[in-house]
Image (tube, grey):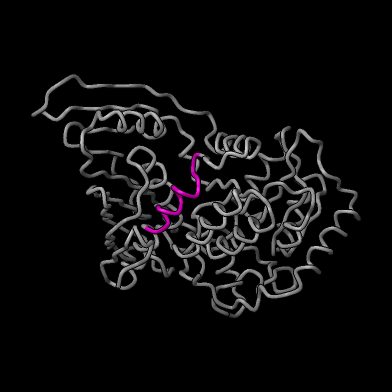
Amino acid sequence: MPLTRRDFLAGAAAGVASMAVAQEEKTGSAPPPSDRLGVGVIGCGGQGSHHLGKLVRNPKVAVVGVSDVYAPRLERARQTAAQAPGFRDYRQLLALPSLDAVWIATPDHWHGRMAIDALEAGKDVYLEKPMALHWQEAREIHRVAKRLRRVVQVGSQDCSRPIYWKARELVRAGRLGKLVWSQTSICRNLKEGDWNWGIDLDASPKNLDWEAFLGPAPARPFDPERFFRWRKYWDYSGGIATDLYVHVLHALCIPIGPEFPVRVMAGGGVYVHTDRDTPDSFFTVIDYPSEHSVVVAGTQCNEQGLPIVVRGHEATMYLGGTGGELVVRPERIFGGEELKLDVGDVPDPIQSHHDNFLDCVRRRDPRTNCDVDLAYRVDVAVDLAVESWRKYKVCRFDPAREEELA
């Protein structure tokens, strides 16, 4: 696994566990009733606080703890969660006996280590996308989850929209014939530049555990810009690829079928917003062993994207995305009638994604809507796209051995 500074993670695991149990006893927190799952949240910033807000309103769960390295966020999270215990060290949260499942909503570079620690601690995991910053970490998460038979949901909520599952049904029924190539995109535009979130001027090493934020990333001096706007930097993020590509690729791979890639090529650049490491425009071609190619476009400088299209030899499928409209149009040489369906949509995809995960946890069914099999394969393609762009190279992968080729 490409994790460095592992000495940061070294320490007395028994001591961490005993502190967590002691704090749970001190606060009077008790295991939830048998019909409620004990859940916690690691990372209580924008995404994490949104998840937490939904969890505290869910009568089927009890929030038993929260964790964050920034003291003001941690305190706000505790107040939201009815004074549930808060921990700066996430391992203390994982040691709580009352914890059944954990939401991980931290920067990308921490996903691999935290998810594996949670699985090894016997917890089920709702893991914000991407599954991991590097594909080797995703492979390890996959292996640990399979070995321990834990339930994992990766947080691409579009996977809980019914349109993609109906599209999968039609593809499997042979309505498109042999798949040839598909396209998807995620494009948006902000004058000030994407990910330039507000910086708390009160943040300092006194209330922000900078070393804990860095974790496996390279050592750097304290820098609030990097903490609050971490998605702009390679140390903690894969940029457009790990924030945005995974959303559309997870969903697209439901109908076309998830595969490991055999070849990945990426282009683009920093065309408008020069305040970042990562490109603001990013374009990728992914070749799969089933002899099917996918084109993905992403930019933060123009919001006119590509429609979601799956092209087969006999027909082409158009997916209306969040609108729920699905059209299958036969190729002229084959003839036939056009099929148009209004599949409908869910009112709150994130809540539906939560519900799917919690239902799978109760049934001990690892086949969530965005499970480790799907997410691992997408992570390989996404990470190789980043490598292709950064190294100006074509990246190749061996699906049988699950190894990158030189």
Answer with left or right where residue 17 lies relative to residue 254: right
**Any magenta on residue 63?**
no
Q: Position of residue 8 (x, y in %)?
A: 66, 76
Q: Farthest top residue? A: 337
85 versus 370 height, above or below: below
Residue drawn at x 81%, y 44% is 82
Answer with left or right where residue 297 lies relative to residue 229: left
State how many labels appear.
Answer: 0
Q: Quadrant of residue 153?
A: top right
Q: Farthest left residue? A: 333
Answer with left or right where residue 163 lies relative to residue 60: left
Q: Quadrant of residue 325?
A: top left
Residue drawn at x 67%, y 51% is 123
Please tell me whether the stretch drawn in magenta is mainly helix, strand or loop.
Answer: helix
Quarter occupied by the C terminus? bottom left
Residue drawn at x 86%, y 48% is 29
Q: Position of residue 351 (x, y in %)?
A: 58, 35
Residue drawn at x 70%, y 74% is 205
Q: Position of residue 358 (x, y in %)?
A: 63, 38
Answer with left or right where residue 7 lies relative to residue 369: right
Q: Position of residue 362 (x, y in %)?
A: 66, 36
In the depicted view, which residue is nearer to us: 244 or 286? 286
Span colored in magenta:
369-380
**Any magenta on residue 377?**
yes
